[in-house]
Every structure is written in structure tokens, then in C-alpha cells.
Amino acid sequence: MNEIQVTSGLLLAAALFMLGLIGVLIRRNIIFMLVCVEIMLNSAGLAFIVAGSKWTQPDGQVMFIFILTMAAAEVSVGLALILQIHHQLKTLDGDAANSMRG
Amino acid sequence: MILVAFIAVLMIGGVIAWITSQWNSILSRWISLIALIVNFVLAIFIWIQKPTIESSNWIVQFSAQWIPSLGVSFSLALDGLSLLMVLLTFFLGIFAVLISWNEIQERVGFFHFNLLWVLAGITGVFITMDLFLFYFFWEVMLIPMYFLIGIWGHENRRYAAYKFFIFTQASGLLMLLSILGLYFIHGRVTGTFTFDYFQLLNTEMPADVARWLMLGFLAAFIVKLPVVPFHTWLPDAHSQASTAGSLILAGLLLKTGAYGLIRFVLPLFPTAAAELAPWAMLFGVIGILYGASLAFAQTDLKRLVAYTSVSHMGFVIFGVFAFNELAMQGVVMQMITHGISTGALFVLAGTIYERIHTREITSMGGFWNKAPFMGTIGLIFVLASLGLPGLGNFVAEFLTLLGAWQANQVLTIFATIGVVAATAYSLRIMQKVFLGNFSSDKIVPDLSLREKIIMVPLVIAIVWLGLFPQSVMNTVKQMISAQFNTEQIISNDTENENGSK
Amino acid sequence: MKLWLIPALPLIGSFILIVAGSRLSKRMVAIVGSGSVGLSALITLFTGYKFISTSATSFHYQAWQWMDVAGFSPAVSFHLDALSLVFIFVITFVGFLIHVYSTEFMADDDGYARFFAYLNLFVCSMLTLVLADNFALLYLGWEGVGLCSYLLIGFWYTEEKNGYAARKAFIVTRVGDTALAIGLFMLFQNFHTLNIQQIAAQAPQQWAVGSETAMVISLLLLGGAVGKSAQLPLQTWLPDAMAGPSPVSALIHAATMVTAGVYLIARTHAIFELAPDALMIVGIIGAATLVLAGFTALTQFDLKRVLAYSTISQIGYMFLALGVSAWSAAIFHFMIHAFFKALLFLAAGAVIMALHHEHDMYKMGGLKKKLPIIYWTFLIGASSLAALPLVTGGFYSKDQILWLSLAGEHGNIWFFLFALLGAFITSIYTFRMLFLTFFGNEKTHVGHIPGNGITIPLLILAGLSTIGGFIELPHSFGHFTVFSNFLNPVLPSVSVQEGFESIEWMIQLIAAGVALSGVYVAYIFYIVKPGLSEELKTSAADLHKFWFNGWGFDSLYDKLFVKPFVFISDINKKDIVDLFYDGLVWISNFFNRIFSYTQSGILRWYIMGIVIGGILLLTLGLIKN
Amino acid sequence: MEVSKINIIDVLPGIFLVTASLIAMLSIAIKRNHKLIFGLTTISLLGVFVYLLVYASNHRFTVEPLFIIDGFGTFITGLIVMSTLAISLLSYAYFEQREERKEEYYILLLLATLGSAILVISKHFISLFLGLEILSISLYSMVAYLRKRPRSDEAGIKYLILAAFSSAFLLFGMALVYSVSGSMNFSGIADYLSSANSLPLTMQAGFGLMIIGIGFKLGVVPFHMWTPDVYEGAPAPVTAFIATVSKGGMVVLLVRFFTQIDGFRFPVIVLSFTIIAIASMLIGNFLAIRQNNVKRILAYSSIAHMGYVLVAFLAGGRLGVEAVSFYLVAYFLTNIGAFGVVSILSDHDRDAEKIEDYQGLFWRHPKIATVFTAMLLSLAGIPLTAGFVGKFYLVASGVNTQLWLLVFVLAIGSVIGLFYYIKIIATMFDKSVGTETLALRPRLYLINLITLFVLSILMMFYGIYPQGLIERIQDFLK
């Protein structure tokens, strides 16, 4: 894989990352925030794969699999928590969960 | 070993006093009293054995490993200056216990624990010869002092305690930086990393580094002393603390600052200190006059006395930086006599507070009529405070000024004017408290036997120091002249070296 | 050698009275109080006899080494020579008489023991002052007398204004003491000792006449002297000091303490002689003070204040004498003045006591018959003060000063004219006082008739102020100079300018005439035409007020020093420096509020925080590269 | 990679912890028993500690390519394990009196410990990531463990989203670094960097993003905002865990990573960390001064403390690492002690977090108050406490490398910090209001109290006689 392709691959990942990041920032719904975080994680995974292919190593892909696993675990815990939040606050608005401050 | 005993007796005594108070509060009072008397007798014993130190500078030394990997040792030593300071500590400590005999009724055990630990910290500061250990003790005395102010103080105690703690801690940290700086510089130059005072003496370093390091040390000491404009913790702390607290603060804690100047700043950084001297003296004079002017305005008796301390401590830094034996002897005398006289004034303020429950001098007056004994004692210490010859403070101030005159004449003139201001505020105390018409609606009984037991030795001490100061001066003579001689030798050496180059 | 006993006895007396005074009976207190000074006087007599009989130049006794630091080694040691002998003689004898007087005068006072304790302490301090062989010990005595003066002026402490007067006295004199202290520092710097004899011996070798250092030191010493002796410009405290009991005024504020300045200058004449300009200033201060105080005395109505201003004025004469190097004349006038002024104060005290603490002369009168002994003794004292010729001690002592102020080697016509004017005013106000008090109609009922305790000291003092003058008679009139011969080893005699010897008798005549005409003026104004003085007072009301208030010095100092000092300390009561630290606290709290605002609890804020942090971090990287 | 016998023994602590958590899970499936699980946990932790003491203390080796088991790592692993032990002792009493099912907590605790232990010894991005995520995911659940409490859930979700968010940064950064250097091994990156004379922009961006991820875990400014909320919402023992084990593991990783790649050659990195350290020390302390919630105060103070640690980190060198190690010991002891006090005072409904809860504590429960006072003084760095020696060490390392600005800010920060530590102490020594008794049952109370006593005695001991610990640390670092 030549240098240009690596750069564009990384740029794609970065674009995805920014997309996720902006999503987290502008979304108030906690589930969407979670989803956007997942996008960011996956963009990082993509970056790993691009980098791995640049060096023709399997490490990047190994890492991607770990990221996927971790994201899954995280989402499972996250959804459970969101359920609980919804149970208590009757809303999924992230900004509503602000009882602690100062 | 006797030096370790000094500290150990106090610390252990404090713990025992705390524990026993669960069963009997009187017992804990007695325990702390006995602990202090034991120490005082020990110290007197040393003094009698070595009234004048002729051959060696150091009377007793003790050294043990502590944290060898950092070059820290548990090193204690006693020379004339330390001995006097330790004596003063135990002497005033005894009265601090006695004066709080009735005043402190709550949490007696904890009170005595703090009292003894603060004294232990102060003792440690006076006898340690390891800079790490010095800083250690320097900080150890803060916490119990904080409690003494913060728990048993007057209405605004919390604010005062905060202020005291933060001021001293902030300046202490700067000193820590300097200690470490010195430690590493010495380590780099010689290869031995050590906090040992004797080895750190004569560390070679560039002039500007020495200047900065000295400022760090100076910060801690001039806040403690205190030098205007770093004095504002003092009036609050002094006026809000319980009587014993004020006694210890004024009598002893301030002296640790003066002691530090003499023990560390001058010997460690002779050249830098000499450069600073005119400024330090200037600040001393400002302190003398500023403190006096503020003392004159106060209506809170303890606050008034607190500002007199600011004024009197101005003489200390003024004298220390005059760089001669006369002024230095004056400073040492000032440390002792101020401890006694101001301590006594605070005790007096405490006894008055016990009687009428206010510190406002506007609601006092004419107490001589009801309590002539108290009046006489008050008169004597007011006179001591204005520097009347025949009392110890005069010797101190006169020697300081006489020595300072050789160093800086203009500033000495202003410092001498401070004595006039001292007259104004001191006599104001006398007038507002003891003279005039008796105007209080409270009953003011004369001093009780216990209070007389406190006051009479203080009076004897201050008169004795005024008439026979030589016995005290002999004790530090060797130490002081050694200090100035070595400095001369050093400067000669460097001159020679420069010459040979 | 019992020299140390002289100051020690009063000290012991004072100590006993302080410690056990409240438990002793009044009789015991009187015995201890007067006895200790009496014993002291006896020892003085004995010592003086020994001193004269062995024709020694000095006795010396060292009690102990006070301090010994780096060459500064003052000892508590006493030095007795002719000068100090004159002083301790006056102090112990007049002191003893005043003690005896006080046993009756103070008999009804609650603070009986306290009074004698202070008085004894004063005598001890004063003796230390004049006996000290070094300046440090002298300073101890110097401050000690100041303290006792403070304590005794404020003796009746329940009155607020007494306390004020006492403090004023202490503080004003301390201003002078500061100058003195600095003078001592300079002396030590130059001689490496504070021993008076050594300095006196070395000074002429070290400095040439007119040397600048000598000049500065002399002026500083003068500063101390001016404060203690209530001379211009530090004279304001003495009139207020009359708040103390009359024996105190007699002893401290007339006979002894206020003349300490005279003693100091006489003692250090060796230095002053090296600074002719300083000496000139001494003379000018003396001349100005004596006239100023005289005019003020003319306008006072308080009996004791008249005497106070007259004291200032008379010490002015002594300073004038010192200024023209007429050392022994100054000391002679000191001694005579001590006798007659103590007498006047004690008599005035008796009058005031008899009239139920009435101080106003205009409310007195006609006491000649009621209090004959007081009247006669007062008359003797007053004549001496007015220097009525031939029969009074005051004539001889003052005449000597008048003569030397003109004819002495440093004398000049202006000094003489001032002194003459002073003499004229002196006799006017003296007799004004006498006439107002003892002549005319009785205006206040006489209560207490003085007993022996009061009258006997008065009589003795009256005797002394009369015969005291005869031990030193002028050249033109007997030429009997026991006193100045006696002092000669210590104080050099003054030489008279060429061509003046012949006119000495003329000067004496003028002086006598001036004194008598003063009496006549007083007689016209207060006996013959009593209304005249009132007219004069109203026609020159402003001037009268100005004089009455002591030439406005008090209000001037009040505006210049006291008010600003009090003002500054009052506005700064809260300590302006603290504002800075309050500011630090405020800033911390301000930061706290700002940063707390970021902790909003809202998740997206926090994310934003991280993002902004990240952007800053990355930008930083870009900039750095 | 070849897994040999020796390697199994070498990674035994990890295996031990995993096994323990599995057994715990199984035992829960059979029968719920709080005491049993608790016993299992403590025994397994003790076992790991004994293993480290006996076997690893004089053993240095690497497990290629993931782990390096050196003295530093072993030491901190031991510290982490012992801290977890203390926390589990505190947790037992804390959870015993709450209704929720308690047993799973210990599984999470063991796993989180495992994650932290892996972080400490990892030398590869993969192990770093795995360790971090094992730690984080366990922590999400632990933070929200008391799910009936709204605050606990709120803290959990905040922590989860923010942690995942920052993980994404970390990962992306790692990917960038990897793409430039071609290695995920620390030593490989170091090799690359040593040949490169300047930092490529991509690499720099990668490090920047990694710093965000690491900074978040450490809770340093400006990535600190989660700290107070999570500290407040989490159960007190969990807070103790976050404050100590979680942050400590990350500190060690940071030290290891940047020491290995010698990141201090690059002024950008030094500057970034300097700014972060200064901001943390100042803002952390400023935030705390008017705070009235004890847990939040401790949270803000931990921000500042991480700033202090960064000073020693930036100082680097052997003294720096020594300082970090010593400071971590002191900091662990102190923080566990402090949160232990909070948890011992907590009741069913809420944690004892308001400052009013401490009003006059000294006169009601002198023992607890004394412990708390000692802990706060240690945090403030007052002598006779380990915190003092620790701070002294930090300052010493800073002065040694002449980081005057940082050291100066450290001093200022300490002074500001004093204010709020004293505030708590002053409140405890104030006049007492009421005399309510503790919610804890006597026996549980005793366990906690003994734990706290042991902690304070250790803390004091290291404060008065630090020589032993220093020698031990120096031994390990050889």
C-alpha cells in the first residue's frame, strides 16, 4: 500500500472520528451519544487497520477485534445504565442528568 | 541523649496527658506540668554546669541515622543560643500550663496534648542541626498551635487559626524549596547529599543562587518573626488564642523566626545576607514604627499587645542584620526579654478577661483601685515594653541600637524614635486598664495565688535580666563571636583566593 | 566605703513599701519612707565630710559589672566628685525634708505607702543619675526619674487628666531621651566606652575645638537635657505636671529632676567646650526660655502653674549660665533654687491644702494672718526667687549669672539684657503671687492648719535659702568663693573678659534695682490699684491669651505631632496591609467561582471541556513546531 | 508468541485474579453468600501479594511482547493488590448494610484490579488497551452499583460516556503513532524515535490524542471534569478505588511509556505536561476551596495531587521515579483512609459527604476523627505523615532538575489546598451538634476501624520512618 493511500485512509478515519465527536457534542439523547462514541471507536479501529496494512502487519486487525469486543461490552453496560436512568428520570436527555455539580 | 529526652518527655507527656484526661482532667494538668518542670530542671542543670561556654561551641550533641538514603540524620545539638531558647521554652511552658489551669475546662486532655506537642516542636526547632529535621519540627509545631487557637480561642478563632496556619505554611514551603536547593547544590559540588547543618555550612554557590536560596529561608523566618508587611496573621492569632496560646505564640513561636535568622540565614549565606542588610534593616525599622502606630490605635487589649510584638520584633531583624556582636547580643536578649514581658502582658490580659469577659480596653479602667497587685505587675511589664532601663528589654534594645548605630545611622535614628512610640502605646495600656476611674460593673478581684505564682517569677526574671544580663550574655558570647569571626575568616579567605588568582 | 548605700537605702525603702506597704501601718510607712532617705542624707553628710577632709578628688565604687559585650562594658559603679556631691547633698537633704513634709501632707491619702514607695524610688534613681560613672548607668537613672515623675504626676490616678499630664510628661521627656540615646551611641562609636571620666579625658585629644562630631554630640546631649529640664522647645510638659501632689512638684519638678539637664551639661562640659556653637545654642535656649516662661507666669492664675513656669524660667537661667561656660554659677543657682523653689512649692502646697485644694490665686487672699508661718516662709522664698538684694540666697546666685552672661568669656550684651528682663518679670510675678495669696481679703475659708510635719521643713528650707547664698559672694562684695573653689577640680572657673572687672558693682546695682522695681510694679498693680491688672488684661486680651497658653506651644505640637499621629493610627486601625491578603482571598474565591461554573454537571459540557483541552493541546503542538 | 511454562508462572498474578473472579461467579451461581465471596476475594488478593513478595521481588523479566515485569511494576502491583484488599475490607461493611445484591461487586473489584495490574506491567499498546478497558468497564458497573440511587446511575453514565469518549482519543492516537512508527511495542516506538531527529506531525498528533486519553484517566485539567461527579455519585469504597488503583495504574503506565520512549527530548511534550500540571495544581485546588461536599473536596484535591505527581514525572530520572513510587504509596494509604472514613460514617440512604456530617465529629467519635485528621494532614503534606515525605520527595525531584516554576506552583497549590483540608478538620473539631450513633453494626464497625487504624499507622510510620520504604523502592528500581 503506498503512502497516499495510507494518508487518505487515515483521513477517512479522522473524518469519521470528527463525525462521531460532533455527534457526541450536539446530541442530547444519551443513546445517540453512545452511538456516536461507538463511531469514534470504530474510526480508531479503522485507523489501526490502515496503519496495520501500511506495515503489512496483522497487529492492526488484532487491535480492531479487541476494539470491537470492548465496544460491545461497553454498550451492554451502557444500555443497562441508560435503562436505569430512563427509569428514574423518565427521559433520555443527557443534560437532565445534572443533579451533581459545583 | 538528654536532647532526645527533652523532646521525648514532652511528646510522651502529651500523649499520656491526653489519655489520662478520660479519667481525670486534673491529672492531665499535673502530668504536663511535671513534664515541663522535669525538662526545665534538666535544662537548668546543663546551664549550671556550663554557664559560660569556653572551649567548644557545642555543649551536647546527639546524632542518629534517620533516612540515610536521603542524607537525613536525626541530629541534635545544643549551643549557647539553643540552650537559652530551650530554657525559655520550658520556663514559659510551665506558665502556659499554670495559666490555663482554670481557663481551660473543656477537652483538657487534648489541650495539654497540643500544648506539649507545640512545645516539643519548638524545642525541636531550637536544637536540631539537620535541615530536614528542622523543617520537620518547624511544621510539627503548626498543627497543635492551630488547634490551640482554633479550639480554645475566642469568638473569631477559626479565621485566626486559618490565617496563622496558611501564612506560616506558605512561607515554610518556600523554605523547603530553599533547603532542597541547598541540598542539591551541596550534593553536586561535594558528592555527598546531606541535610547536615555543619556540612552545608560554607557551601560554595554562585551569588545569585545564594540570593534566591536565602530569600526562601528568609520568607519562613520573616513571616514567623514577623516583619511588616507579613505580620497580619499575628494580631489575629494572638488576640484570638487562649491565654496559653497567646503566651506561647508571642513568647516562643516568634522566637523561632529570630532563631532561624541567626542560625541559618546568616551562617549559610553570609555574603547574600550582607547584601540584603540595608533592606532588612529598613524593614525592621518600618516594622518598629508601623507596629507601634497600630498598637496605639487598638482597643482590644490582646490585639494591642500583639502589635507591640510586631514593633518589638522589628528590633530583632534590625539587629540581626546590623552584623556585629553588640547588636546580636541585643537581639538574643530581645528574644528572651520579649518572650517574658509580652508573654506576661498576655497572661495579664488573660487574667483580666477571666474577670470581666472582654478584651476591650474601653470597658476597663481603674483596676488599680481594686487589684493593686495586678496593677503593679501590669506596670512593671508595661515599663518593660517601653524599654525602661533596669528591666531586661532595655538591655536588649540598647545593645541592638548601639550595635546598629555602627552599621546604619539613619535607620538607627528612626528605630530610636520607635522607642518614643513605644512609650505612647505602653502608657496607654496603663492608663486605660489600671488608671482612671473604676468603671466596670464586674467584680475585679486581685490576682489569686496561682496567678501570683505565675507572675512573680516573670517579674523576677525580667528584673534579673535587666540588672544582671551578663550571665545570659556569657552563654551566647562564644557562639556569637564565633559566628562573626568565622565570617571574617571566610571573607578573608575568599579575598586571598581572589588575590592569588 | 559606703557610697553604694546612698542610692541603695531609698531603693530598699521603696522595695519594702512596694512589697509590704499595704500591710504596714501609716506610721511604719512614714518611718521607712522618710527614714531611708534620712539615713541616706546622713551617709551623704558623712561621706561629704570624708571627701572634704581627705581632700580627695573622687571616690569610686563598683557594685558589679552590668554588661560586657564586645568592648561595651558599663558597670554599675558610682563616682563621687565635687559636682555629684553637691547634687547628692541637695537630693538627700531636700528630699528628706520633703519626705517629712509629706508624712503630714499625705496623711489622709489612701495611697500613702504607694506615695512613699514612688518617692523613695525617685530618690534612688536621681542619686544613681548623679553618681553614675558611665552614661549607661546615668541613662538608667535618667529614665528612672522619668518613670517616677510619671508615676507621681499621675499619683491621683482616678482623674483622667492627671493620667494625661503624666503621660505627656513621660513622652515629651522621652523625645529628649531619644536624642540623648543617639548621643550615647555616637559617644560609644568614637570612644569605645561610655565611661564619663574617660570620655572627658579623651575628648580634647580626639577633637579640636569646633569639631563637627563634638558639635553633633553636644547638640544631642542638649536634646536630652532640654527634655528633662523643660527648656525650649520641650518645656510644655512641666506646667501640666503640676497635677501631682505638691511635695512631688517640690522635689521632682523644682528641686531635683528638672535640673538633671543642667547636671548632664555640666558633667559633659568637656565636650561642650569643644563645641562653642553648641554652647551658644545652650545659652540662647536658656535666655529664650527664661523670658518666655516669665511672661507666661505673669498671666497664670493657678498658684502651682505660676511656680512651674517660674521653675522653667529659673532653669533657663542655669542654661544661660552653662551657655556662657559659667559652670559653677549654674550649679550654684541650681542649689539655691532647689532650696527656695522647694520651699515655695511646699508652702504653696500647705496653702492649697488649707484651702481645700483650691489652686486659683484669685480665690485666695488674706492668708497672712491665718497662716503666719506659711506666710513668712513663703515671703522668704519669694524674695529669694525675686532675688531681692543682699539678704536672699537667690540674689547671690542670680547675680553671678547676670554678671557672667555679660562679662564671661562667652557672654554678650544680649544675654545680659534677656537675663535682666527675666529678672524684672520674675520679681513682678513672684510678688503678684504673694500679694494675691496672702494679702487682701480672705476669700476662701481656711480649713487645715498645718502642723509640725509641714512647718519644720518649711522653716529649715527658709533658713537654707537665706544663708545658702553666703557661701559664694561676688568679687565686688566680700569675694568669698567657697563653692566655686570646691567645684573647681571638676568644673573649670570662668574667666572674665578684659575691662569688665571694674563695672561689676554697677551690674549688681542694676540687678538690685530691677528686682526692687519689679516688686514695686506688683505692689501698684495688686495692692494699690487692683483694677489696673484687669484693664490691662482686657485691653491686650489676645496677647494675654497667647501668654497664658504658654506661647501656643501646646497647640502647635498638638497640631504638628499628636493629631497627625493619632489620626494616622486611627484610620489605620484595621491595618491596611491586611487588605492585600484579603485581596488574595478574594481572588481565590473569584477563581473558585469561575471554575465552579465549569462544573455544571451537564455531560456535554464535560465533553466540550475535553474537546477544547484537546484542541489547545494540538494547537500548542502546531505552534511549537 | 510462544507460551512457555515460565511465562505462565510469570503472569500468575493475573491468572490468579481471573481465576478468583471466575470462582466467585460460579459460587454465586450456586449460592449467594456475601461472607464467602468476601473471604475468597481477600484470600486471593493476599495470595497474589504473597506471590509477589516471595517470587517476584527479585525477579526481572519480560513476557514478549506484551508485559515487562520489573521492579517498578512488581512494586506497584503489590501496592495495587494491597490497596484493593483494604478497599474490599471497607466494602464488606459498606455493602453488608445495603439491600442490593452485594456479591457481584467483588467480581468487578477483582477484574478492575486485574485491569490495573495489567496496565502497570504492560509494554505494548494492546496490553495497555486491554488493561485499561478491563479496568474501565468494571468501573462503570462499580460506580453505578447502587442502582437505586439516582446519583450513582448518573455518575455511572457520565463516567461511561466520557471514558469511552476518551478511550476513542487514546485509540486513535495509538493508531496514528502506530501508523508512523510501525510498532505498537513501546521499545519499537522508542527505536523509531531515537532514529528520528524530530517529531513527525502525525506522531505528534498521535501523542497529543493519547495524552487526552491518559489525562482523562488521571483526571488532570482540562480532562478533569468528571472527577467530582463520579466521586460524589459512586459508593465510597468505589470512589476510593477510582482515586487510588485506577489512577495509580495510569500514572505508572505514563511513567513507563514516556521514560521508555524518552519523550522528554521533545519540548512540545514537556511543555504540554507542564501546562497540564500547573493547571491541575491550581485549578484543582481553587475548585475545592468553597466546596462543602467532602467527597467533591477529595475529588478536587485528587486533581491537584495528580498535578503534583506530574511534577515528579516531569523531573524524571531515578529520583523522579522514586518520588512517584513513594508518593503513590502515601497517596494510596491516605486516600483509602479518607474514603474509608467516609464509608464508615455513611448510612443506608446516603454517603456521609456533606460537611455538616462532620460537625463536631471529634467529640462524638474521636477515633474516626483522629484518623480522618491524620489523613487530611497527610494530604496537606504536614510532617509526621507519609504525605509529607511524599510531597517532600516530589519537591526534591523537582528541585533536583530545577523545575522551579512547577515546584513553585506546587508550593502555592499546597497552600491553597491547606485551606480546605483545614476546613474539614476545623469542622470536625467544632462544637458538637447532637450525638447520633453510627449506623454500622459493632462488628462491622470494628473491621473498618481496624482497617483504618492499620492504614493510619502505616501512614504515620512511613511519615516518621520512611527509610524502610525508600530502601524497598530503591531495591525494586535497581
Image (cartoon, coloured by chain):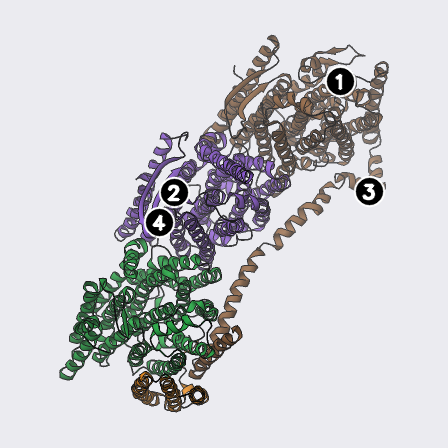
Marks 3 and 4 share the same chain: no
Residue C541 bears which disc, if any? Answer: 3
Marks 3 and 2 share the same chain: no
How busy is the neighbourhood of tag 4: few (under 14 within 10 Å), some, or many (20 plus)? many
Q: Residue furthest top?
A: C53
Q: Does the residue at mark 4 contact the one at mark 1 (Cβ under 8 Å)? A: no
Q: Position of residue C206 (x, y in %)?
A: 67, 24
Q: Earlier in the sequence, mark 1 or mark 3?
A: 1
Q: Does the residue at mark 4 contact the one at mark 2 (Cβ under 8 Å)? A: no
Q: Does the residue at mark 1 contact the one at mark 2 (Cβ under 8 Å)? A: no
- Amino acid on which the number 4 mark rests in the picture: Val
Within the image, what quadrant is residue C294 found in? top right
**Relative to B84, residue D393 above or below:** below
Viewer-nearest residue: B124 or B366: B124
Q: Does the residue at mark 1 contact the one at mark 3 (Cβ under 8 Å)? A: no
Q: What hue does chain D carry in this figure?
A: green
**Relative to B186, residue C467 above or below:** above
Q: Which chain is orange?
A: A
Asked whether, in this view, residue C110 is left or right of residue D437, the answer is right
The residue labelled by disc 1 is C494
Residue C314 bears which disc, if any? Answer: none
How busy is the neighbourhood of tag 1: few (under 14 within 10 Å), some, or many (20 plus)? some
Q: Which chain is purple?
A: B
**Relative to C309, residue A9 above or below:** below
The residue labelled by disc 2 is B127
Q: Earlier in the sequence, mark 4 or mark 2?
A: 4
How busy is the neighbourhood of tag 2: few (under 14 within 10 Å), some, or many (20 plus)? many
- Amino acid on which the number 3 mark rests in the picture: Ala
In this rendering, which labeled residue sits more in front, label 3 or label 2?
2
Within the image, what quadrant is residue D453 found in? bottom left
